[in-house]
Amino acid sequence: MPALPAQASAYSEFDAGIAARNLGLCDIAIAHMTAALGAPDLLASLRSGALLVRGDCLRQTDKNAAALADFDAAIALSPDNFDSHLWRGELLEHLARYDDAAADFSTLIRLRPDLSKGYVSLGELYLAQKKYDEALAQYATLIDVGSDDYLGYLLRAKAYFLKGAYELAMVDADRVVKMAPRASPGHFVREAIYEAQGKLALALSDINLVLEDTPDDVEMRRQKGIILWEMGQFSEATDALIPLKKLAAADGYTILWFDLARVADDEPDRDLESRSAAVNLTKWPGPIVALYLGRETPDDIQSFIAAAPFDERDDMRCQAAFFVGEWQVRHHAKPVGYALLRQAASDCPVDYAERGAAAIELSRLR
């Protein structure tokens, strides 16, 4: 008679759940942790960890209500667990329950005032709500704690920049560049400040400094193409974006900017179909690429945005206003296109390329 397989113990289920989660196999991790939590012999000391791991995987698979229930239960069993408050706070922020998220992030600071994570999380939460002074206070405390070199100055520069206090932002950005001069994140912030001030040559200089050390940095190479486009140097913009054909073949933003540069340079982008072959047209900004390919309409774009998660819609509306505005102008619907570009120039966040680009395009079209 063949031997029956031995039933897995609660600990082996727990251990398998940890391993699966570490490998990114969340469905398997959830199954193992559910089995562990349902077993009568699971040690009480492991229940909080099992709930936490299952909650994290539920969060990653967009089962938010179940994830929140697991985080609540984990915290009830272990009130001072750092990761439980961090992950619950991040989920609450995603759900736009900002006051509850702030309470969790404040708990992080109480538990570990020597670590940067609590100050960073709380500061980013305030930035998301445009509570700039509250964010600045968190970053000032982080600087005083001194646990992460230039991080506090970098984040404070970003907060000052978003607030519109460009001179104060530049002081902190310069400090970061001095503390970490090569390929410094300070260059990223400083470039954005220069761009917002219309100092495009200085912005380009910072971009080139970063690209000297990291020539394959997709974001900065794309930003170089955008700055050159804004400067009216369309051939140079095209040249800056060409290497991204291989580095970022699936990046819809690069495809769109390359198309704008080619058309502005009176070189119709005849290979848009082949260049965009790797772009997922069902994932943002893929629908806009599909519009440029003639497969979607502006109404389709609006429908896509309306169906998107609530916390993503404002960013999509900003980007759609610019790129659909450009498309409308190109297709001889200038009044509609101008209105959309004005919307992008006024409504896009100050750190979005589409805001400055829309303002420059409007000045060209007058």
Image: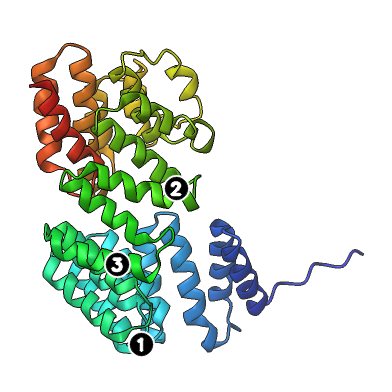
Q: Amino acid at mark 3?
A: Leu
Q: CA distance from mark 1 to mark 2?
A: 34 Å
Q: Amino acid at mark 2?
A: Leu
Q: Which residue is mark 2?
A: 211
Q: Secondary structure at mark 3?
A: helix
Residue sitting at x 46%, y 29%: 242
Spot the residue most to the right. 1
Q: Secondary structure at mark 1?
A: loop
Q: Is residue 104 left or right of residue 163?
A: right
Question: Quadrant of the rendered structure where residue 280 is?
Answer: top left
Q: Which residue is mark 3?
A: 154
Q: CA distance from mark 3 to mark 2?
A: 19 Å
Q: Earlier in the sequence, mark 1 or mark 2?
A: 1
Would residue 282 be visible to someone looking at this image? no
Residue sitting at x 42%, y 77%: 83
Quadrant location, the C terminus: top left
